[in-house]
Image (cartoon, helix red, strand yellow):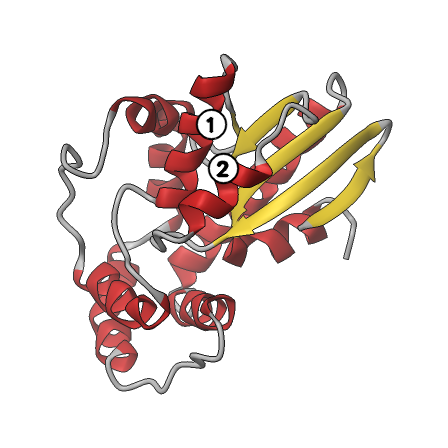
């Protein structure tokens, strides 16, 4: 976890691995009444869906890239959807009678941003990245090392890189806004976005 100050507010960032079942218990144990705000790198609509679903109800058709990601991630344990780390946030907040705060864009904002950033050429390039992903010898020394290398591969697609940067900028802005009226924030964020968010906040 990374803890730092934004003005008078203490912010703790908990980096998580999307997909790993073992992250559920780790995140739930980190969420305590010591924090006056629990934030998560999801949009508002995603949080609402996460609150009401479980693994059995989740209607999800993974892309080929998602399937390759999950295949490699299984080296570190069971993998499932919805993202266990984020499900832990909504479950823990429900048990405490509080609402998690969205750090990411709402669906409408994200769709507009995605369409602005990702071109038809970017979509076609995904096939080349898919082929490369099946031949790459990934760093499997830790889930964090693998996920960051995977993210670097995906972000060789110019449009996808632009999406990542826009999200990092937006999430950093949301954290800064929350820090204006909160005292102690826990922010649960996928590990591959944390470094960029810290840069946006001027902390790197």
* Left or right position of 6 against 86: right
Q: Which residue occupies the foreground of this view, 43 or 128?
A: 43
- Image point 28% across, 59% down: which residue? 78
How many other residues sit within 10 Å of disc 1, few (<14), some (14-19) or many (≥20)? Answer: many
Q: Is residue 131 above or below residue 53?
A: below
Q: Which residue occupies the foreground of this view, 80 or 146?
A: 80
Q: Quadrant of residue 114?
A: top left
Q: For mark 1, what is the residue?
A: 92
Q: Secondary structure at mark 1?
A: helix
- Image point 16% across, 43% down: which residue? 60
Image coordinates for residue 68, horizontal then vertical, percent: 23, 69
* Left or right position of 165 against 118: right
- Residue 167 visible in the picture: no
Q: Quadrant of residue 136?
A: bottom left
Q: For mark 2, what is the residue?
A: 28
Q: Is residue 50 above or below residue 154?
A: above
Q: Is residue 16 above or below residue 121?
A: above
Q: Which residue occupies the foreground of this view, 20 or 168?
A: 20
Image marks 1 and 2: residues in contact by CB distance under 8 Å = yes
Image coordinates for residue 126, horizontal then vertical, percent: 25, 66
* Left or right position of 34 against 168: right
Image coordinates for residue 59, horizontal then vertical, percent: 13, 37
Q: Give the mark, 1 or 2, whose residue is nearer the N terminus.
A: 2
- Image point 73% across, 36% down: which residue? 11
Image coordinates for residue 41, horizontal then vertical, percent: 49, 38
Measure how far apart labels 1 and 2 are at the Cα level: 6 Å
Q: Quadrant of residue 186?
A: top right
Q: Which residue occupies the foreground of this view, 119 or 184?
A: 184
């Amino acid at each position: 976890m990374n803890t730092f100050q934004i003005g008078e507010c203490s912010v703790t960032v908990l980096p998580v691995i999307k997909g790993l079942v073992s992250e559920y218990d780790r995140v739930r144990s980190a969420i305590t009444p010591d924090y006056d705000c629990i934030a998560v790198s999801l949009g508002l609509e995603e949080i609402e869906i996460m609150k009401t679903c479980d693994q059995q109800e989740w209607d999800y058709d993974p892309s080929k890239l998602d399937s390759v990601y999950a295949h490699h991630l299984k080296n570190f344990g069971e993998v499932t959807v919805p993202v266990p780390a984020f499900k832990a946030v909504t479950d823990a907040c429900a048990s405490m009678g509080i609402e998690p705060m969205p750090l990411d864009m709402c669906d409408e904002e994200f769709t507009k941003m995605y369409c602005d950033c990702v071109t038809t050429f970017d979509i076609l390039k995904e096939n080349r990245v898919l082929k490369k992903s099946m031949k790459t010898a990934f760093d499997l020394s830790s889930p964090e090392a693998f996920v960051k290398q995977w993210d670097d591969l995906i972000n060789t697609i110019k449009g996808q890189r632009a999406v990542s940067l826009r999200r990092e900028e937006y999430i950093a802005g949301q954290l800064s806004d929350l820090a204006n009226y909160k005292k102690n924030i826990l922010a649960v964020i996928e590990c591959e976005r944390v470094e960029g968010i810290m840069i946006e906040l001027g902390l790197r």
